[in-house]
Image: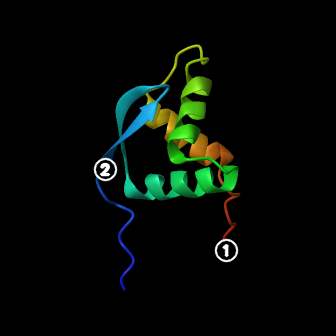
Amino acid sequence: METPSPYHPPVKRSLSIAGHATSISLEPLFWDMLKAAAAREGLAVAALVARIDAERIKAPTPPGLASAIRVWLVVNGPPAQSVAG
């Protein structure tokens, strides 16, 4: 089976955050990272997104939710592997 390209347009999914339905558009790569992060944290994806949302709204200039999720994943994801060169 061929690995899908990471260059894929965003995919919109609906989640319930704090009792409100919301749609979030993320590239499939970020959806996969979000699912893995939620599993590591022992949370449902919606619960992790709610936590990220609560953190983001405390920022002096809160970014959009999709942007906050991407930043959170980069900051809190597994460490990047170094490439020997």
Q: Which of the two marks, 2 or 1, is nearer to us in this view?
A: 2
Q: Name the residue nearer the viewer: 22 or 31.
A: 22
Q: How many marks?
A: 2
60 horizontally vs 28: left or right: right
Q: What secondary structure is marked by label 1?
A: loop
- The single residue placed furthest to the top in the displayed view is 60
51 horizontally vs 13: left or right: right
Where residue 17 appears, as percent x and y from the top left, is: 47, 30
Q: Is residue 16 above or below residue 4?
A: above
- Tag 1: amino acid: Gly
Q: Quadrant of residue 78?
A: bottom right
Query: Which quadrant does the C terminus fall into?
Result: bottom right
- Tag 2: amino acid: Val
Rendered residue at 53%/51% (across/down):
34
* Residue wearing tag 1: 85
Q: Quadrant of residue 6?
A: bottom left
21 horizontally vs 85: left or right: left
- The single residue placed furthest to the bottom in the displayed view is 1
Q: Name the residue nearer the viewer: 30 or 42.
A: 42
Rendered residue at 59%/40% (across/down):
72
- The single residue placed furthest to the front in the displayed view is 19
Inter-mark Cα distance, 2 to 1 = 35 Å
| Label ID, residue 40 | none
Disc 1 packing (10 Å; few <14; some 14–19; many ≥20): few
Q: Name the residue nearer the viewer: 13 or 85.
A: 13
Q: Quadrant of residue 83?
A: bottom right
4 horizontally vs 19: left or right: left
* Residue wearing tag 2: 11
Where residue 11 appears, as percent x and y from the top left, is: 31, 50
Rendered residue at 58%/40% (across/down):
48
Instruction: Identify the mark nearer the N-term, 2 or 1.
Output: 2
